[in-house]
Amino acid sequence: MIKKLNIVAGILVCIATTATSVAQTKTTAAKATPAKTATKAQAGKIIYTKDPATGVEYHFFKHDKKGKMPVMGDFVNVKMVFKNDKDSEINNSAKKGGDSLGTYKLQLTKLFNGCLEQGIAMMAIGDSAIFKVSTDSMFLKMNRNPRAKLPPFLHLGTALTFSIKLVKFQTQEEIAAEQKKATEAVHMKEKASIAKYFADSNIHVTPTTDSVMVLKYTPTTNKLIQDGDSVYVTYVGKLLNGQVFDQSANHAGAPGFVTIAGRPTLATVYTPSMHLIQGWVIALSRMHNGDKITILTPSSMAYGEHGAGGAIGPFTPLIFDMEVLKVVSNK
């Protein structure tokens, strides 16, 4: 998934992580590079144009006036060199935080008149330009903490410079379609892995990626677990290859666990909104005191696209052996 980031927020993060390493002297720039452009701009050798509608101060080095340009809300990939008024390089997408092409992927959002995002919205793919942005506006107006102070390498009343090359942009609809296609492909792969597990294990259950599948169930005739009941459960969590990634037996004395009949047991209160994976919530809603169940929960009912820890990767289906040792009504 692609995170929606605004450019200022991304830069604020970069500043926080690079503040101690910012150069205090002017850098010597190579010829015909954005870095040299920024240096000249600080020396007053480049004339900036101010857009009357937005207040953006810009100078184009390459500009396709007939090219298609992004609009607010679109996602852009840009190569960026960001400098302060002393020509010290604060951030460079080719050196820190960029992708394999040395670009940042950002969403254009208008933050104030004259903001960098408005400048990028003036560019076509392949364009390169330099923009001046007010330090005061970018950091003081954007900061929610009125007592916040500028880092020592930034100064009130000055301008920041951003050397930008627009490599690519996509609309929100294009991003959504791309994400949907990627998610569908991953779900198909997951469904195939579940089907293979069933075939290899000689289990006759229809594989899905959106519901809990019961592999084995030993029910009792005791009372069904009710909303608000305290429930005490032992479990073993496994991957499809049989690797155990977690089990209650490993949590003796841990917070949230008690010992019942010599067995470390997870103690929880059942509610439909309890803070457990959805597969567990669904399983417990069908169980009674004393029940044993083995479920296969697809990633959509477990840890989804993010996974959990090193053992559980994104879009990973899981198997749980669960036993309800005790149920106490709290009503």
Image (cartoon, helix red, strand yellow):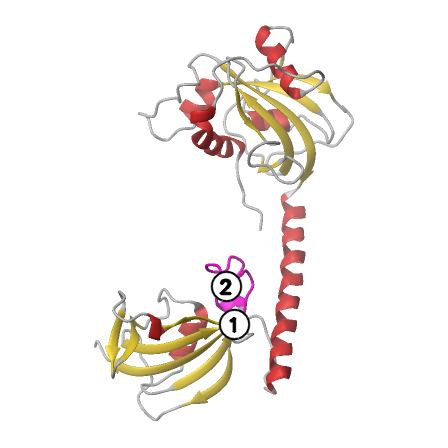
- Name above or below for residue 48 compared with residue 296: above
Range of magenta residues = 299-317
Q: Is residue 12 left or right of residue 258?
A: right
The picture places residue 28, in percent across and down from the top left corner, at 61, 14
In this picture, residue 298 sits left or right of residue 252: right
Point out residue 205 in the picture as x, y percentages from the top left corner: 59, 84
How packed is label 2: few (under 14 Cα within 10 Å), some, or many (20 or more)? some
Give the residue furthest to the top.
Answer: 44
Q: Which residue bears the numbered disc 1? A: 239
Give the residue furthest to the left: 331
Instruction: Determine the image quadrant of residue 207.
Output: bottom right
Residues at circles 1 and 2 in contact by the CB criterion of under 8 Å: yes
79 shown above or below 185:
above
Q: CA distance from mark 1 to mark 2?
A: 8 Å
Q: Residue at x 31, y 86 (%)?
A: 289
- Magenta stretch contains residue 31: no
Q: Position of residue 285 (x, y in %)?
A: 38, 78
258 and 225: which one is in front?
258
Q: Residue at x 31, y 90 (%)?
A: 222
User: Which residue is at a point 31% across and 25% down the rendered structure image?
Assistant: 147
Q: Is residue 180 left or right of residue 281?
A: right
Residue visible at 73% across and 31% down? 125
> In this rendering, does residue 207 appear at all?
yes
Residue 47 point in image, percent of width and height? 65, 8
Q: In which quarter of the view is residue 283 placed?
A: bottom left
In the displayed structure, 234 sits above or below 85; it is below
Residue 51 visible, this angle: no
Q: Residues within 10 Å of mark 1 (few under 14, many from 20)?
A: some
Per the image, the residue denoted by label 2 is: 312
Q: Main secondary structure of the magenta part?
A: loop
